[in-house]
Image (cartoon, grey):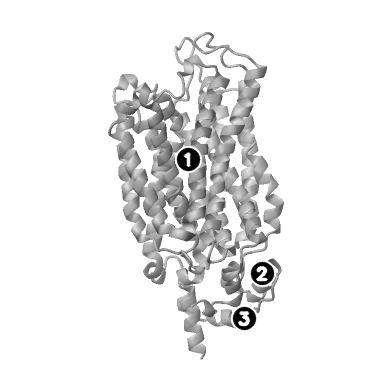
């Protein structure tokens, strides 16, 4: 089959792993590092925002964000991401991967800085400007998903393609880790310089005026890693697969890859001209031909990503609430505002270090050995098992003696999310669709995931509230409790396991073999002879 492919694409498929592969991983990966930092750093500072802007005089507890504000601050970037995935996914197929790639990065840099500069004296204006800039930050982040995955898959060789795409995604783990570590450094520095009493000692004095700088600095630093790779992104050549199969310029593709691979490659423009005349080989997204060839695949990639993100984001954005519930984070009134940021950041960093980061890199190591399908099944299976193991004996886990066990189980759930569907749902959509629709289909799959993330993030806020209305957080209705919420998440993970059977295995196959573009070239060649 490989012999029927264009020579320039064959050369990429069989190329030995070399320096340009690692350059591409770093350039695309730094985008993902920034994405994760920006998306998850907000959960480190939401408690502080409540103390600064929503302090209630005479209250026994520190101020907290009202439910609607909390939902907006936590969720608005996810809404922006969903819109960005669809828009930039489509644009990446229309204009080319490279042309759009710099725009997403610029948007992320500008909006990271702007969200830290959210202005106004009144809580309403600060929160409104913060939400505005975080929406557009999310929009830029959304574009990074389909473009990074597509660029990496189109540059990689057959043998290690899965590991390369997963390595780009694994930079997310370092982004989450960096967010936690940086928040700890900043809060330690401010705590050392500006001493403050605990809330229960002095409610006003516990939140120093300088605390307003802490959350702003944490949000703005997200722009730095993105800026560092901007120049490199602009210098990257367009991928050969886009240039040849979508822009139909085999000569340019061969010239670009001759430089990258440092070998002479024949252009074969005549093959592309023949393919252009084959109507069957140029079907669109909404055609019967696409439905027949890839309809179930798209259903598989969208449903698995959707179900995974319901579970993944409901845990990730609200892990600080789980830590508080099991006593890992002391009651808010026993700390000042800066100490609280440090404690939440420490907990998030420990989880990232012990389970999130190792999970990603296990996937990188094994994805081209045991395949995408096996990793996704294993991941969903163990996520289901651990969720139920946390849920059914939940009261056992809340007992002080069993807290370490709870955190260990919780960490394992995270480990199998990342050594599992969180990585594979990102990799597979970049491999199984035709080049002219690849970025769009990846964007649709990723946007479906973000829809799940929005449901997970917003739904969990309300679902996990105590069943007794008196014990629910201020402003929230009674929910179904943490125990029942964990049971719901276990069921969601099991459904994800079932939907995985719709997704094909792409290990060791060329992109054109997976998408059916090889068969279209075969038909053309047969017709010519």
Secondary structure category for the residue under label 3? loop
- Left/right of residue 336 with respect to residue 498 in the rendered view: right
Task: Say which label, 2 or 3, has the lower sequence index.
Answer: 2
C-alpha span from label 2 to label 3: 14 Å
C-alpha span from label 2 to label 1: 38 Å
Crowding at dot 2, Cα within 10 Å, few <14 / some 14-19 / many 20+, comes out as many
Crowding at dot 1, Cα within 10 Å, few <14 / some 14-19 / many 20+, comes out as many
Which label lies toward us, 3 or 1?
1
Residue 394 placement: quadrant: top left
Question: For this rendering, which residue is in front, 161 or 365?
Answer: 365
- Left/right of residue 256 with respect to residue 59 in the rendered view: right
**Which residue is drawn at the image coordinates 68% and 49% (left, top)?**
229
Question: For this rendering, which residue is in front, 361 or 440?
Answer: 361
Task: Say which label, 3 or 1, has the lower sequence index.
Answer: 3
Which disc, if any, is residue 77? none
Residue 260 placement: quadrant: bottom right
Verify CB contact (< 8 Å) between mark 2 and mark 3.
no
**Which residue is drawn at the image coordinates 55% and 25% (left, top)?**
341
C-alpha span from label 3 to label 1: 48 Å
Q: Dot 3 corresponds to which residue?
A: 268
Q: Dot 1 corresponds to which residue?
A: 355
Task: Say which label, 2 or 1, has the lower sequence index.
Answer: 2
| 123, above or below 490, in the image | above
Crowding at dot 3, Cα within 10 Å, few <14 / some 14-19 / many 20+, comes out as some
Residue 46: % across, % down: 51, 28
Q: Dot 2 corresponds to which residue?
A: 257
């Amino acid at each position: 089959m490989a012999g029927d492919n264009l020579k320039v694409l064959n050369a990429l498929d069989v190329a030995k792993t070399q320096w340009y592969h690692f350059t591409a991983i770093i350039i695309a990966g730094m985008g993902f590092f920034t994405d994760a930092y920006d998306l998850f750093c907000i959960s480190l500072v939401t408690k502080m925002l409540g103390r600064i802007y929503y302090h209630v005089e005479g209250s026994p507890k520190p101020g907290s964000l009202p439910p609607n504000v909390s939902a907006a601050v936590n969720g608005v970037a996810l809404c922006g991401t969903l819109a960005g995935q669809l828009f930039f996914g489509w644009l990446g197929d229309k204009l080319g991967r490279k042309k759009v790639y710099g725009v997403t990065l610029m948007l992320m840099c500008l909006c990271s800085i702007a969200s830290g500069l959210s202005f106004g004296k009144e809580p309403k204006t600060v929160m409104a400007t913060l939400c505005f800039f975080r929406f557009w930050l999310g929009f830029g982040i959304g574009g990074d998903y389909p473009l990074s995955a597509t660029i990496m898959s189109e540059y990689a060789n057959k043998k290690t393609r899965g590991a390369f795409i997963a390595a780009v995604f694994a930079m997310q783990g370092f982004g989450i880790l960096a967010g936690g570590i940086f928040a700890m450094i900043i809060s330690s520095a401010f705590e050392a310089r500006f001493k403050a009493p605990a809330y229960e000692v002095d409610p006003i004095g516990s939140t120093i005026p300088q605390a307003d700088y802490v959350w702003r600095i944490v949000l703005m630093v997200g722009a730095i890693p993105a800026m560092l790779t901007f120049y490199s992104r602009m210098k990257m050549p367009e991928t050969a697969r886009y240039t040849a199969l979508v822009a139909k310029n085999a000569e340019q593709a061969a010239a670009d890859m001759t430089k990258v691979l440092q070998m002479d490659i024949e252009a074969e423009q005549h093959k592309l001209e023949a393919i252009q005349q084959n109507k069957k080989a140029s079907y669109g997204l909404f055609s019967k031909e696409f439905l027949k060839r890839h309809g179930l695949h798209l259903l598989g990639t969208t449903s698995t990503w959707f179900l995974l993100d319901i579970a993944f984001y409901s845990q990730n954005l609200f892990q600080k609430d789980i830590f508080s519930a099991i006593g890992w984070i002391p009651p808010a009134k026993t700390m000042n505002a800066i100490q609280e940021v440090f404690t939440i950041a420490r907990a998030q960093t420990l989880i990232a270090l012990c389970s999130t980061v190792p999970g990603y890199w296990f996937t990188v190591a094994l994805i081209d050995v045991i395949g995408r399908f096996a990793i996704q099944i294993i991941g969903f299976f163990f996520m289901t098992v651990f969720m139920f193991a946390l849920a059914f004996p939940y009261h056992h886990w809340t007992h002080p003696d069993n807290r370490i066990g709870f955190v260990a189980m919780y960490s394992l759930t995270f480990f199998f999310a990342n050594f599992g569907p969180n990585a594979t749902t990102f990799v597979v959509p970049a491999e199984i669709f035709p080049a002219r629709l690849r970025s769009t289909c990846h964007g649709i799959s990723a946007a479906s995931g973000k829809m799940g993330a929005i449901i997970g993030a917003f739904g969990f806020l309300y679902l996990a509230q105590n069943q007794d209305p008196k014990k629910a957080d201020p402003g929230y209705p009674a929910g179904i409790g943490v125990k029942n919420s964990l049971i719901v998440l276990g069921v969601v993970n099991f459904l994800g396991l079932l939907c995985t059977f719709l997704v094909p295995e792409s290990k060791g196959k060329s992109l054109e073999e997976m998408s059916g573009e090889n068969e279209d070239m075969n038909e053309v060649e047969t017709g010519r002879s």
